[in-house]
Amino acid sequence: MAAQHETDLVVVGSGAGALTAALRAAHAGARVLIVEKAAQYGGTSATSGGGLWIPANHLMADCGIDDSEDEALQYLRQLLGDTVPDANVRAFVRHGRRMLRWLCAHSRVAYQAMAYYADYYQHLPGAKTGGRSVDPLPYDARALGADFLDLQEPHRQTRVLGLIGYSNTEGAILLSKSPGWWLLLLKLVAVYALDLPWRLRSRRSRRLTMGNALIGRLRRSLLDLGVPIWLRAPVTRLLTDAHGAVTGVEIERGGRRETIRARRGVILGSGGFEHNQALRERYLPQPTDTRWSAASPHNTGDLLLAAQAIGAGTRLLDEAWWGPTMHIAGEDRARMLFTERSMPGAIVVNAQGRRFFNESVAYTTAVQAMYGAGNLPAWLIFDARYAREYPFGPLLPGGMHLNWLQPRRIRRGLLTRAATLRELAGRLGIDGDGLAATVARFNGFAAAGRDEDFQRGENPYDRLYGDVRVQPNPCLAPLTEAPYHALQIHPGDIGTKGGLATDAQARVLDTQGRPIAGLYAVGNVAASVTGRWYPGAGATLGPAMTFGFLAAEHACADLVDNRAPDSERIPSPA
């Protein structure tokens, strides 16, 4: 007979949206159990940048930036069109700021606004040049005790030499070579090296940054409330009653089947389906490959399928949080090219050797361009000056003379190199005349400081990852120094963003648009409130945590203190 358990609320998954839901419910007094498929908690959130996109948040005042819900709605409605129910968009804008303020007041979670991290679509009314994206403050892993070892490690691309982490704010200084960047790097190295005696035990840094800082802070907050996480406990089935309401889950744990009854329902925060090749081929644009995803390999769509099996509806299954990626043999997920294509002196070309978009645009927009007719396969190309000045994937700037620390397969096998552009084109199998003409035209733009083809570097978001030392345009530098370098890039992702249809309280809807009692979905298992677009840095986690917060309040409405001001009142169950 299967072991049976009872609790108030079951939360499936342990990313930021799931943990926020668990924290809000537990703080209200509900008994909460978190079940996680993987052997470590944190999911893709733990390996992410950890930033949140929260319009009109209370931290913007620290940067002297004004914002309002009306401006945010204007921006989002222009961007999203009719791809998302307006009630969901309004719920996110209204309650995201409340969620963030609540976390900062009632948990260990701590953030700062990023004054210069611009919204991605600066041409739209309501866009802001900074402040809506917030950065988690670093956290000391010693506060987690033994639970630190169960925290999913950061993505290798968010650590110098795969070891030393940095916050988004610190990363922007380092990558743009802003004044003081070298001293900051020395400080980060010193903090890592002098963490004794831990340094003698492990190479892993105890200064948590980015997604590890967020998940570490959320986990410590849950430990304060005594909320358990069961690891290696995949859900195999959603349990329902005679009326179709969800009453719990069936899991596999320790080699046996167990059931968990949940009096208040089940909140799914289990991630997308990006590592399920069959589902990718069924729903996503082609070509597609699980190896191109930078998300957690455990995200295989299990709960999407389980919810569909009980009649749940879906939206936007052909969408993902797109971004150009590179795949390195031996690594369990791809690396997203967030900054490499934007630094001055790099271009992206197709098989004709031609540029086809502004290389500094938002990553979703970049892949949308890559899926345009004739643009795949695509290559990122740069010269020796670029290789000397800037990091590229796992490689540090050549001028630092530290790449000898990298494995030989990385140093020798990552890039294609050639003494001339035509020779490089021949090795890649692309049009040599086309590439030579493209580079000559681009070099002219760099000299003049204006990209006449794609206007690269002409808005605050483009310039975020420019080099402030390069003038007149920090995103444009000529490709003139041999050898020339190239890497094939892929239309990858940091997760799928289509999934279960939900309402403004994160309740899962059936195929007729009716709520399924007792079932909620947040994060990438649900269809995104940002539709087919990516409004700003943190637009994955910001909505995930907001709707996790709202789901918990809806499930625990009778426990939640509803004496807040009218503008912050919890929505009543419908």
Image: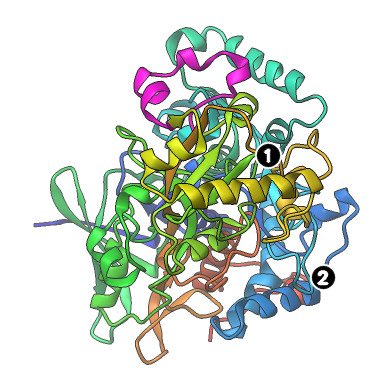
Q: Is residue 442 left or right of residue 49?
A: right
| Mark sitting on residue 331 | none
Q: Nearer the viewer, mark 1 or mark 2?
A: 1
Q: Is residue 508 left or right of residue 21?
A: left
Range of residues picked out in magenta? 393-416
Q: 10 Å neighbourhood of mark 2: few (<14), some, or many (≥20)?
A: some
Q: Residue furthest bottom?
A: 512
Residue at x 52%, y 7% (from the top left corner): 197
Q: Is residue 117 left or right of residue 385?
A: right
Amino acid of disc 2? Ser
| Mark sitting on residue 68 | 2
State the separation of the CA atoms marked 1 and 2.
41 Å
**Residue 158: x %, y % from top left:** 54, 35
Residue underneath mark 1: 478
Amino acid of disc 1? Pro
Quadrant (top left, top right, bottom left, bottom right) of the N terminus: bottom left
**Residue 6: x %, y % from top left:** 31, 60
